[in-house]
């Protein structure tokens, strides 16, 4: 009878251990799923970072282009201003010459 009792005790312990093993397997499977999700989250975060880096590089290029455009416009404006000043000076010079010619004509 002692064997029967020992046998029943071992059967119960074996069933409990099987349940415990099954629970551990489920827990490990859950951790594996969480790990896979974390890895995917990291991949997504890295892709987002790359996209932001591309956006920053594009914005930097656009800023450089805008700066160069502004400088070119300023240079063109300065050139136009200088051309205008030269033209006005030339007009004034020509008006002076016309005035002198008229004076000579009247004499």
Image (cartoon, rainbow, N blue to C red):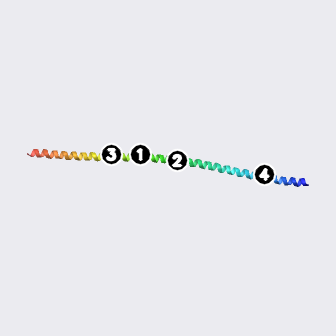
* 80 sits to left or right of 5: left
Q: Position of residue 85 (x, y in %)?
A: 25, 47
Label located before the other in sequence (1 or 4): 4
Mark 4 secondary-structure assignment: helix
> Sequence order check: which comes first, mark 2 or mark 1?
2
On screen, residue 102 versus residue 80, left or right, reads left
SS category of the residue bearing label 2: helix
The number of discs equals: 4
Q: Residues within 10 Å of mark 1 (few under 14, many from 20)?
A: few
- Quadrant in which the C terminus is drawn: top left
**Residue 76: where, in percent of width, then height?**
32, 45
**What residue is drawn where x is 33% and y is 45%?**
75
Q: Counting residues from the N terminus, which is met first, the one under dot 1 or under dot 3? A: 1
**Mark 3–mark 2 distance (CA, rounded to whole Å):** 37 Å
The alpha-carbon separation of the residues under discs 3 and 4 comes to 86 Å
Do the residues under discs 1 and 3 have CB atoms within 8 angstroms?
no
Q: Secondary structure at mark 1?
A: helix
Whole-percent x, y for residue 46 in the image: 56, 47
SS label for mark 3 = helix
Residue linked to disc 3:
76
Task: Give the residue at mark 4.
Answer: 18
The residue carrying pointer 4 sits among few (fewer than 14), some (14 to 19) or many (20 or more) residues within 10 Å by Cα, namely few
Q: CA distance from mark 1 to mark 3?
A: 16 Å
Instruction: Please name the residue shown 76% across and 53% down the image.
Output: 20
Proximity of marks 2 and 1: CB atoms separated by less than 8 Å: no
Question: How far is the residue under mark 2 from the one under mark 4?
Answer: 49 Å
Whole-angstrom CA distance, mark 2 to mark 1, is 21 Å
Kindly identify which residue carries mark 1. 65
3 or 2: tag closer to the N-terminus:
2
Q: Position of residue 104 (x, y in %)?
A: 10, 44
For the residues labelled 3 and 2, say whether their Cβ atoms are less than 8 Å apart: no
């Amino acid at each position: 009878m002692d064997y029967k009792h020992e046998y029943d005790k071992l059967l119960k312990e074996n069933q409990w251990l099987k349940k415990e093993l099954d629970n551990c397997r489920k827990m490990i499977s859950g951790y594996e799923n969480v790990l896979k999700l974390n890895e995917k989250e990291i991949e997504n975060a890295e892709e987002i970072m790359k996209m932001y880096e591309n956006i920053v590089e594009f914005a930097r290029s656009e800023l450089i282009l805008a700066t160069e455009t502004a400088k070119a416009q300023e240079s063109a404006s300065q050139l136009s201003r200088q051309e205008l000043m030269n033209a006005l000076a030339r007009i004034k010079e020509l008006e002076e010459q016309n005035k002198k010619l008229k004076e000579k004509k009247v004499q």
